[in-house]
């Protein structure tokens, strides 16, 4: 559909579990992102991998850990989550231009609906 | 830092009537601006983008937006609403982390309802 595929689409996990979200992009882009979408809140950018470097958002708790083994794949490892972490997690990719220039549009996957019980 | 404000959290229109979704931005330099749409249980889809070319931007599904620098606005319009337009719409501005990494800043969203 969109060139960005996320799995699983739905995930229910307990607070003591460890799970991973997967994202794959088939667009040849060089930047990938994780966003969190909670009810009644704007989309929150969690992590960016741009030009093979990771940019951290300091407000993201350490129970979320990203991994980007190559430019086409992005993971979000989850452990000891809290119920307030329940949300739709969206992956996106874009073709970043030169460092220091404004980016182009991002292409989004369909998201993983995460429920923490 | 850049920011974006969507002035209406909910908009309701009748099928066949015009749609106006309002967005204002703040920017210290020439911005890139986008509108995205999200249908229920779906990811976000790009409707249109402005990147300092023509100020009137045409997008998919009959939507268009006009960049007005003097008003710092980027409102989304459509002449005639269709039932399938019911969704959430996000106005987005491009910004940077320190170090020059790009990021997209999302507005809070406007939920569009279309009535028969």
Image (cartoon, rainbow, N blue to C red):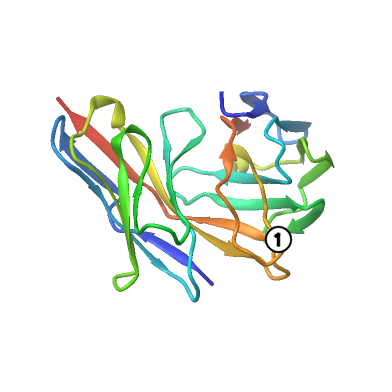
In percent of width and height, residue B108 lies at 41, 52
In percent of width and height, residue B62 lies at 29, 36
**Image point (71%, 52%), residue name:** A48
In screen coordinates, is A57 left or right of B43?
right
Residue B35 visible in image: no
**Image point (50%, 74%), residue name:** B29
- Residue B6: quarter of image: bottom left
In percent of width and height, residue A12 lies at 65, 26
Residue extending farthest to the right is A69
Q: Which residue is mark 1?
A: A98
Instruction: Name above or below for residue B49 compared with residue B60.
Output: below
Disc 1 secondary structure class: loop
| Total marks in image | 1
In percent of width and height, residue B1 lies at 54, 72
Instruction: Name above or below for residue B104 compared with residue B79.
Output: below
Instruction: In this rendered view, identify the residue nearer to me: B102 or B8.
Output: B102
In screen coordinates, is A32 left or right of B74?
right
In screen coordinates, is B37 left or right of A114?
left
Residue extending farthest to the bottom is B28
**Image point (60%, 38%), residue name:** A90
Instruction: In this rendered view, identify the residue nearer to me: A88 or B80.
Output: B80
Instruction: Name above or below for residue B68 compared with residue B59.
Output: below
Residue B7 visible in image: yes
């Amino acid at each position: 559909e969109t060139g960005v595929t996320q799995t699983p689409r739905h995930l229910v996990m307990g607070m003591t579990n460890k799970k991973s979200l997967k994202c794959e992009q088939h667009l040849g882009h060089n930047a990938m992102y994780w966003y969190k979408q909670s009810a009644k809140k704007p989309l929150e950018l969690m992590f960016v991998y741009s030009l093979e470097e990771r940019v951290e958002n300091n407000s993201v708790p350490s129970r979320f850990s990203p991994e980007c083994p190559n430019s086409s794949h992005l993971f979000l490892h989850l452990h000891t989550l809290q119920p307030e972490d329940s949300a739709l997690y969206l992956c996106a990719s874009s073709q970043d231009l030169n460092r220091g220039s404004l980016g182009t549009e991002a292409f989004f996957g369909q998201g993983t609906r995460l429920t923490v019980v | 830092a850049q920011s974006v404000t969507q002035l209406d959290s909910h908009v309701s229109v009748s099928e066949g009537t015009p749609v106006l979704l309002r967005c204002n931005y703040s920017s210290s330099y020439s911005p890139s601006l986008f509108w995205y749409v999200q249908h229920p249980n779906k990811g976000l889809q790009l409707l249109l983008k402005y990147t300092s070319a023509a100020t009137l931007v045409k997008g998919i599904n009959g939507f268009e937006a006009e960049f007005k620098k003097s008003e710092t606005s980027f409102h989304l319009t459509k002449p005639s609403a269709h039932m399938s337009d019911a969704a959430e719409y996000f106005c987005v501005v491009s910004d940077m982390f320190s170090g020059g990494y790009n990021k997209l800043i999302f507005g809070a969203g406007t939920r569009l309802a279309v009535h028969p």
